[in-house]
Amino acid sequence: MDACVVSGYLSKFITRKNRNMEQEERMYQVPLEMICRHNRTAEVCRAAVEEDGWQLENVPEEVKTPELCRKALETEAGFGNDFHRGLVQHIPFPEVCMEVLKECRENNPEELYGVAVAIRPEVMNGEMADFLLPLDGRCISVLPVHLQTPERVRVAVETSGMSAVGRGGVPKSLLTPEVYVRCAAHSRESLMMIPWAERSPEVCLMAKTLYPDWVRNHPEFVPESVHNQDSVYTLNSLMESLTGEKFSYRQMTDFYNGKPLEVKRMETPDGVQKDKAVKFDKETGKFSFSEIRQERKRGLKM
């Protein structure tokens, strides 16, 4: 082929390529939402997020990649905006969201809940849930229902008490009496947030065990129904008066459920029982006594 012809072809090709590059460069300089969707190519979108991480919002889902999302985050980090909630909601990749959460834990832990709220429900997974809940139990309320399990609710209330479940978002079927007992054990502030209807004998016993002075000064906390029914709460009050001892929550719940309780001294209608193992029968409301084995009295292992 004649050299002049070849030169002409190359000249036209280069000119056409330069025009295409100029066109793409012009596209880079305008927001993506002003560019026709079919022109939002991977190259155009990458250039856009390199200039402005927020342009990720206007990147078509089929064009997004983990690398492109990381580039958008990197761009915003350059402006000092490490954990924009609005940006995270446009990331459809769990692994990238997990990276953001981990970095947030290290550098902006106070923003963790806000970032979790922004993650798309369909993107949230079990790995992120198990990462979040020991750090901020409130995140249980933003998990999709299929990720809310009894075990995760337990972790959430142990972490944040009533703040985890008091704002809604958790099915009532998961808010068992035991959950509220754990809320009572979390802190006095959490205890005070427990709804009236959920102040069971067990909740009230936990409150009295952990915060006796506060309960004494706020008798209205314990509902009349708890005072007036035969329960673990009233049994604890009775045992304290008969023995002069204080018992832990676990000791009293075990005792209420049939496990022997060792006492040094206990007053009964038949006289004083000393150094005895006492059992309680919920059905009859009666006590029975047995001798404490000598090995236990000496502090030896059975």
Image: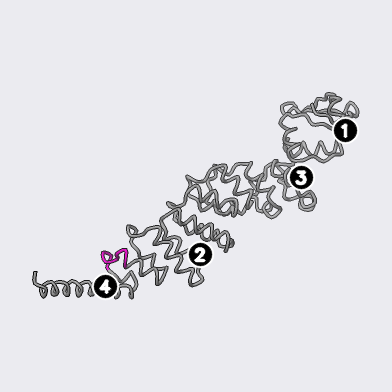
First to last magenta residue range: 36-43
Q: Is residue 142 magenta?
A: no
Magenta stretch: helix, strand or loop mostly: helix
Place of residue 298 in the rendered image (x, y in percent of width and height, measured from the top left): 87, 29
Q: Position of residue 251 (x, y in %)?
A: 76, 36
Q: Amino acid at mark 1?
A: Lys
Q: CA distance from mark 2 to mark 1?
A: 60 Å
- Graded by Cα atoms within 10 Å as few (under 14), some (14 to 19) or many (20 or more), the crowding at tag 3 reads some
Whichever of labels 3 and 2 marks the residue nearer the N terminus, that label is 2
The quarter of the picture where residue 72 lies is: bottom left
Q: CA distance from mark 3 to mark 4?
A: 74 Å
State which tag comes first along the sequence, 1 or 4: 4
Which residue is disc 1 drawn over? 264
Q: Which residue is mark 2?
A: 83
Q: In the displayed structure, does residue 252 sit left or right of residue 60? A: right
Looking at the rendered structure, the kind of residue marked 2 is: Phe
Q: Earlier in the sequence, mark 3 or mark 4?
A: 4
What residue is rendered at 71% in x and 31% in y?
A: 257
Q: Secondary structure at mark 2?
A: loop
Task: Locate residue 28 relative to residue 79 in the image: left or right.
Answer: left
Tell me whether the residue at label 1 lies in contact with that at label 4, contact meaning CB atoms closer than 8 angstroms. Answer: no
Q: Is residue 256 left or right of residue 16?
A: right
Say which of marks 3 and 4 sits in front: 4
Q: Residue at x 69, y 55 (%)?
A: 189
290 lies left or right of 63: right
Check contact, mark 2 vs mark 1: CB within 8 A. Answer: no
Return the mark for residue 209. Answer: 3
User: Where the C terminus falls, by quadrant?
Assistant: top right
Tag 4 residue: 21
